[in-house]
Image (cartoon, grey):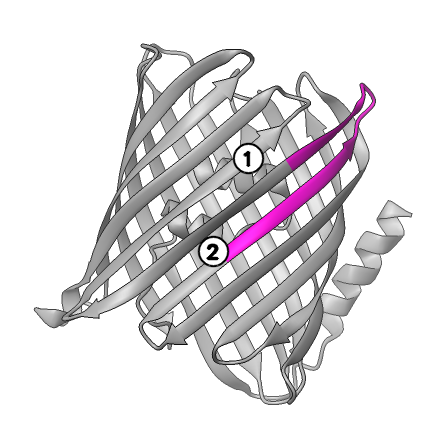
Amino acid sequence: MTIKTNRLLVCALLAFPTTSLAQDISGAATLGYGHSTTSDGGGDLNSYTLDGIGKFAFQNGWSIGAEGSFVHADPDGGSGDINVSDLGLRLQYQTFSGAMFGGYVDYTDFNGNGLLTGDADATSYGFTGGYGNQTIQAEANIGWTDASIAGVGNSSDWIDYGVNVSYTPTADTKIAGHWQLSDLNTNASGSNLASYGIGASHNFGAGFVGFGGISRVDFDAANVEATSYGIGASYDLRQISTVPAQISLELARTNLDAGGSDADVDTVRLGITIPLGVRENGAPLNSLADSIMAPRHNALSTLFDNIF
């Protein structure tokens, strides 16, 4: 059943009408660096990230989007590097009335060297539906995840539920929140993994954008709870030069309770974002705010995205 569903969705993604010329191309890429310090003496963590998104909208109402995230983290103490990769592809159709529906495929691979869940990989696929216009967008998703998590057990029948709502009261302000629930049924036991949060960005003018957010993740099976919050600002270099890029700085904290050990992880993130197409200034892709406002389609991938 799983293999057949994967094949059907991939075929649908490849078979949508590509004969219409693209009407709108948008996206961005962010190159980032983060430095994290833990309160329990666990040492510092340096992380290097590359994030990208892209969307091609066609004249017939169809659009195809892609997103990717790569993290290489180097902790002090010689405990081994941490690597995270996340790739996603989605197909969507929007009617003239604003109703929209589509499908998605996501893949996440996490090599944690003993951090949080140890090693994990997850392939998610499912369907989306909702409504959107220039002011508000609301989307719900339902899907399935094939996953393997060290210490928790292999799983082939997760069910993922999610809601993502964004509100754009003005051209300069965006507020968005999400709720994601992964209903896990592993070969060890059943459990839930939940993620929810709210974030916002505002363009103050003269090239300055402020952003921030707060999120919460509960992972019963791995005994992990994480509350993250952060605030930051970016500046558009086109205000003073011809360089089409924004530089950003974010200060974030994650209160992490993993396996009975409680610690605060303070992170400073720097980023250089290059807009592609018609994308307007907003939260950089390596920020906590962006991971809250544009979450992945399962709560496990969203957890990793929030932390790094």
Q: Is residue 14 magenta?
A: no
Give x and y (percent) for residue 192.
71, 32
Query: Taking 219 as reference, is 65 above or below it?
Result: below
What's under tag 2, amino acid-wise?
Met
Report crowding for label 1: few under 14, some 14 to 19, many 20 or more residues within 10 A (C-alpha).
many
Report how many numbered discs are placed on residues in the image: 2
Query: Taking 189 as reference, is 168 above or below it?
Result: below
Q: Is residue 308 visible?
A: no
Which residue shows up at 83% across the image and 61% down it? 8
Query: Taking 278 as reference, is 152 above or below it?
Result: above
Give x and y (percent) for residue 151.
68, 16
Q: Is residue 181 magenta?
A: yes
Which residue occupies the foreground of this view, 10 or 99?
A: 99
Q: Which residue is mark 1?
A: 217
Give x and y (percent) for residue 110.
55, 31
Return the disc, 1 or 2, that comes first in the chain's sequence. Answer: 1
Report crowding for label 2: few under 14, some 14 to 19, many 20 or more residues within 10 A (C-alpha).
many
Instruction: Identify the secondary structure beneath mark 1.
Output: strand
In the orientation shown, which residue stands out farthest toward the front? 169
Res. 293 mark: 2
Give x and y (percent) for residue 95.
67, 85
In the orientation shown, which residue stands out farthest toward the right? 1
In the orientation shown, which residue stands out farthest toward the left? 240
Distance between mark 1 and mark 2 Cα atoms:
15 Å
* Quarter where residue 89 is shown: bottom right
Magenta-tinted stretch? 177-193
Query: Taking 104 as reference, is 116 above or below it?
Result: above
